[in-house]
Image (tube, helix red, strand yellow):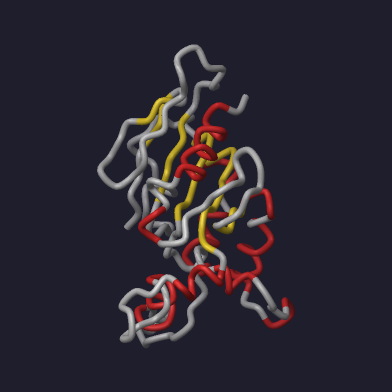
Amino acid sequence: MMEVGLHEQGVPQQTAAEPRVEAPAGSSASPGATTVARGRVNERDPLAYSSALPADFRFRNIAFLAPACTFEDFAPVLGRHEELWDELRLFAMTDEAERKDALVPVLYPRSLLYFVSGVCETDAEGNREAGKPLVGLRRHYAGKDREDLPDAVRVVLDYMTPQRSVWSPVDGGPGLSASAVHHGDFDDDPKVRESLRTMIEAP
């Protein structure tokens, strides 16, 4: 499940699992809501089924921090993006950083998302599916022959343009920068927090 916090009018309501990013007093942040999410998202999650929210409610911004959701789960949600949100941005690590972020040194020298993709995912029948594409894993975006890709993978690749994808560490300018090199860094990373602030304060 994903961890979600709503930020009304650019001022976050903090949860234990997310960073606190506030629009300064007197800022030009527009009314709306921003959610910062980690973990999984699919059609059963509140991002897609927001029945507790007003009928005309929509997210102004959505920011993913190293999400473990699969392309397969995320593609149906993307199909509804025009009614659910205005902007979405992914913050995750480069493949080089993922490979250096050892989950358990010596025993498992790759990152948490490498482990989830390689060991924890299953197919529709419940059988283990090694190497299942995850939205937060950079290696699943590169070197693909599009003609051979499943529809769900193509949908995600088409949507996640460079303006929606921040591969840390990178200095991509306002709203597109990050310096996290471990999965646990994203909540507190100064560049990620500044990028989130930029998103919230954008007109």
User: Residue 9 placed where, x, y %?
Assistant: 46, 23
Residue sitting nearer the eye, 197 or 36: 197
User: Residue 39 placed where, x, y %?
Assistant: 37, 59
The residue lying at 44 percent from left, 59 percent from top is: 67
Give the quarter of the image for residue 4. top left
User: Residue 3 placed where, x, y %?
Assistant: 33, 49
Give the quarter of the image for residue 139. bottom right
**In the rendered image, which quarter contains the C terminus?**
top right
* Left or right, 140 with reference to 115: right
The residue lying at 41 percent from left, 31 percent from top is: 7
Give the quarter of the image for residue 107. bottom left
Q: Please identify the residue farthest to the top as the structure is shown.
A: 26
**In the rendered image, which quarter contains the N terminus?**
bottom left
Residue sitting nearer the eye, 12 or 50: 12
Q: Is residue 158 placed above or below 24 in the rendered structure?
A: below
User: Residue 161 placed where, x, y %?
Assistant: 68, 55
The residue lying at 42 percent from left, 65 percent from top is: 68
Q: How many marks?
A: 0
Residue sitting nearer the eye, 64 or 103: 103
Q: Is residue 146 placed above or below 159 in the rendered structure?
A: below
The residue lying at 49 percent from left, 27 percent from top is: 32
